[in-house]
Image (cartoon, grey):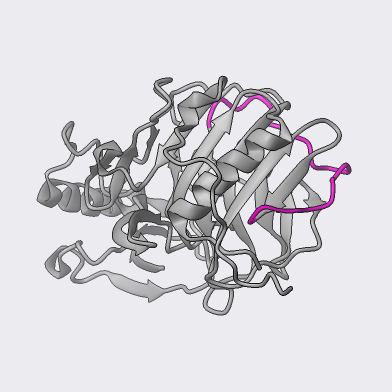
Amino acid sequence: MAMNNKTLRPRVSGFNPKSISGLYAWYDAADATTITQGTGVSAWADKSGNGRTCSQATGVYQPAYVLAGQNGKNVIDFASSSKNMTTNGTAWGLTFANTMFWSFQFPDTAASAATYALFDLNTNRESVFGNATSELRIGTGLTGITPVSRRWYVLSIKWGGPFTSYRLNQSNGSTIDAGATFSNGASTQMYMGFNGGSASIRGYVGECIAYDSQLSDARITTVNNYLAKKWGATIV
Amino acid sequence: MTYAIFPSLELALAFDASVSAAMGWPSVEQKTERYAIPMKHPSRNEWSVPVRDYAQPHLISGTQIVEELTSDWYPPERTT
């Protein structure tokens, strides 16, 4: 039976990321109470309770807040190359063994540069980004996947050293070893939508959830299902 | 990205200050400190400030406006 374009169905209703221990940060654009606006989004509050607010104090770099941008939910639009937010001034001290989830729209590669960056932890560390042919990279490890332009994705990454595994819309990717380590160097910031150089996501971000440990496969499935249903991601 | 080009850092800072004042920044409520940080343009040795649609045209009259579709902004705190 063909499995294409089937909406992921969660097995758990009413899931709350706080129900899994070790929640480190949680950014949810659908929750308008977490958003502060200047001309764009100047602050995106952390719902984990840990106070790791993402902010952008310079107006010209503030991303836009788009109402009902995806599946009826509000999103943050990092549309142009300079839009970004950081956990500036707030410690981001995750070690290499952690799990991150991103719900985002892959950039329009036809209208912008092929390279893109979803987030970064320090200059040129480029934690999740695409190379010149838009191939998804995690750390410096290549995944062999070129996501579809303007499609909504749920990406989960179980960071390890040296073995990192990921899923894109719940489909298991290959385990990556070379280069796919979680490296934050001396950085105490997380840069969202930008790598500090020439790459930015140039698309929507809906939600980001981070845990301070490697979650079990079952829990990763639970969080992925929660995000997939909420944001309307589909199996490809 | 659209940039306004200025012959000196002082003029670029004055542009930032004008737009910031028009927007009511700095603003604790909006969590916004300023409009933009002047930069040396990536491919020009001139001071520039990105231009957004809310920067009123009269504030940038008399300056050179350039459209750069592929150049990216490098914040001064991140140099690579």
In the image, is B13 to the left or to the right of A77?
left
Residue sitting nearer the eye, A80 or A170: A170
The structure residue drawn at horizontal position 79% and vertical position 39%, both measured from the top left corner, is: A164
The structure residue drawn at horizontal position 38% and vertical position 59%, both measured from the top left corner, is: B48
Question: Horizontal and vertical percent for residue A151?
Answer: 54, 68
- Whether residue A176 appears in magenta in the rendering, the answer is yes
- Range covered by the magenta-colored residues: A169-189
In the image, is B71 to the left or to the right of A2?
left
Please, is residue B63 above or below residue B13 in the view? Answer: below
Question: Horizontal and vertical percent for residue A199?
Answer: 59, 57
In the image, is A222 to the left or to the right of A159?
left
Residue sitting nearer the eye, A19 or A115: A19
Q: Quadrant of the N terminus of chain B?
A: bottom left
The structure residue drawn at horizontal position 59% and vertical position 46%, both measured from the top left corner, is: A224
Residue sitting nearer the eye, A169 or A59: A169
Please, is residue A19 above or below residue A179 in the view? Answer: above
Query: Is residue A20 visible to the viewer in this orientation of the structure?
Result: yes
Q: Quadrant of residue A94?
A: top right
Question: Horizontal and vertical percent for residue A139?
Answer: 74, 45
The structure residue drawn at horizontal position 19% and vertical position 62%, both measured from the top left corner, is: B54
Please, is residue B63 above or below residue A155 in the view? Answer: below
- Whether residue B71 appears in magenta in the rendering, the answer is no
Question: Horizontal and vertical percent for residue A162?
Answer: 86, 33
- Predominant SS of the magenta segment: loop
